Structures are given as structure tokens and as C-alpha cells.
Image (cartoon, helix red, strand yellow):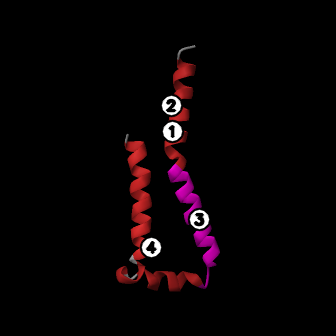
Amino acid sequence: MIHLIVPHMFLFLMLWLLNNTVALGLMKIYDQIRGVVPPIFVIFVVGIIGIVLWFYPIIYIFIMNEKRTTSKV
């Protein structure tokens, strides 16, 4: 059950951080790295992390099923 809850918690945390970027003072950090890293790269990295977290429960269940089937042999 934890493997279903944790990715959703990270999703809501990322959405909360996105909505409160200015209030938390994260714009200063973004302004510093904006000249070095293009914004599309940041969006790409965050998207990949989100996809991995979203599919982590499926990957975990698949790996556990593989371990169960190979241990019976």
C-alpha cells in the first residue's frame, strides 16, 4: 500500500511547490540556474521523475512477481 501512497504524496508535494514558488523564495534559485540550464530541460527532468514515480508501483509489483516465480523453481 505504501508503494501506491508515496508517489501520490510526491505528486501533490511537487504541485504545492509549483504553486508556492514565489512565497517560498524558490524563484531566487531558479533565477540563478536559468542562465545555465534551459527551462525545457528542467521541465523534462521533472517530467521524467514524475513518470518514474507514477509507474513505480507497477514496476515494484512486476519485480516482486518475477522474484516469486523464480524462487519456486
Majority secondary structure in the magenta region: helix
Q: CA distance from mark 2 to mark 1?
A: 6 Å
Residue 23, by quadrant, is bottom left
Q: Earlier in the sequence, mark 2 or mark 3?
A: 3
Start and end of the magenta stretch?
35-54
> Regarding mark 2 in the picture, which secondary structure is present there?
helix
Q: Which residue is mark 4?
A: 18
Q: Give, as a three-letter code, the residue at label 1.
A: Tyr
Vertical placement of residue 33 versus 41, above or below:
below
Q: CA distance from mark 2 to mark 3?
A: 27 Å
Q: Residue at x 51, y 51 (%)?
A: 54
Q: Which residue is mark 2?
A: 64
The N terminus is located in which quarter? top left
Q: Residue at x 57, y 27 (%)?
A: 66
Q: Earlier in the sequence, mark 1 or mark 3?
A: 3
Q: CA distance from mark 3 to mark 4?
A: 15 Å
Task: Measuring from the top left, give residue 47's x and y in whole percent.
Answer: 57, 63
> Regarding mark 4 in the picture, which secondary structure is present there?
helix
Q: Give, as a three-letter code, the residue at label 2.
A: Met
Q: Give, as a three-letter code, the residue at label 4.
A: Leu
Q: CA distance from mark 4 to mark 2?
A: 34 Å
Q: Residue at x 57, y 83 (%)?
A: 34
Task: Measuring from the top left, give residue 48's x and y in whole percent.
Answer: 59, 59
Q: Which residue is mark 1?
A: 60
In magenta stretch: residue 36? yes
> Which one is in front in this view, the residue at disc 4 or the one at disc 2?
4
Q: Which residue is mark 3?
A: 45
